[in-house]
Image (tube, grey):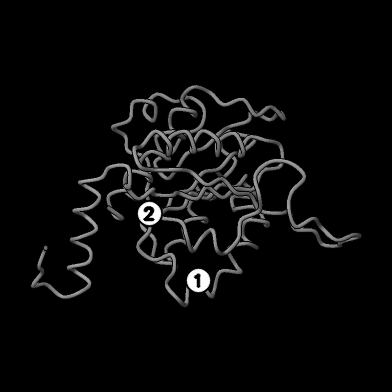
Amino acid sequence: MMRCAQPTQTCARSRVQIIRRSFPEFQRVTEVLVVFYSRKGSTAELARQICRGIESVAGARARLRTVPPVLTAIDQPQPAVPTDGPPYATHDDLRECDGLVLGSPTRFGNMAAPLKHFLDGTSALWISGAMADKPAAVFTSTQTMHGGQETTLLSMMLPLLHHGMYIVGLPYTEAALNHTSTGGSPYGASHVAGGGTQSRLSEDEKTLAQLLGRRVAELAVKIHA
């Protein structure tokens, strides 16, 4: 029988680590939440690429969620569940996740109102510290190359910093960040739609989105090992 002279909490953690090493099938799954708002599909496609990056990491799983639109006048009640696509994000999603990636199209150099509205309602999580010490990252899409991508990414980081999260970016050691002629930023993944309504990402944009998801997942796995 294993004896432990350490404090109870430390001893329990040691036993869990021994069990995980002895029985790999019982390894804890690290879940990274991807929350986005998208109007024309570009941000949604970035979110899917980020999920691919997350799930390329052993022991990590992506949880994809969206947020409902914000309307100034509501003629009829909005459905609790969207008619298609991923479910709406809840505070439980934020509380349960091991990492978070936020995405929004650019609105005058800022995040879109629906995502801001969702974040504005997380004060209870801030008070309890439920999101502290978790890795987080951000992504965006714009119509034009200089349409405010970087300021949008920075604006999404601010509430995450208030929640005590670790911000993850993209390093210039990644070749795609050095030679991209479309989206891509050290602040996070991005997409340039080019003034149209198409949502097709360039290969560099896909690569960088997947890398961002992978980096958040790798850090989350290490933190929660």
Is residue 175 or residue 51 the one in the foreground? 51
Where does label 2 land, which residue?
135
Q: In this view, does 191 lie to the left or right of 185?
A: right
Other residues around mark 1 within 10 Å, as few (<14) / some (14–19) / many (≥20): some
Query: Furthest-right residue in view?
Result: 75
Q: Residue at x 32, y 47 (%)?
A: 27
Residue 211 at x, y percent in the picture:
39, 34
Q: Is residue 70 left or right of residue 59?
A: right
Is 163 located above or below residue 83 in the figure? below
Q: Residue at x 59, y 34 (%)?
A: 45
Where does label 1 land, which residue?
125
Q: What secondary structure is found at the residue carrying circle 2?
A: strand
Is residue 44 or residue 87 the one in the foreground? 87
What amino acid type is highlighted by mark number 2?
Pro
Is 96 located above or below residue 216 in the figure? below
Quadrant of the image containing the N terminus: bottom left
Query: Furthest-bottom residue in view?
Result: 127
Q: Earlier in the sequence, mark 2 or mark 1?
A: 1
Residue 108 at x, y percent in the picture:
64, 50
What amino acid type is highlighted by mark number 1?
Leu
Q: Quadrant of residue 60?
A: top left
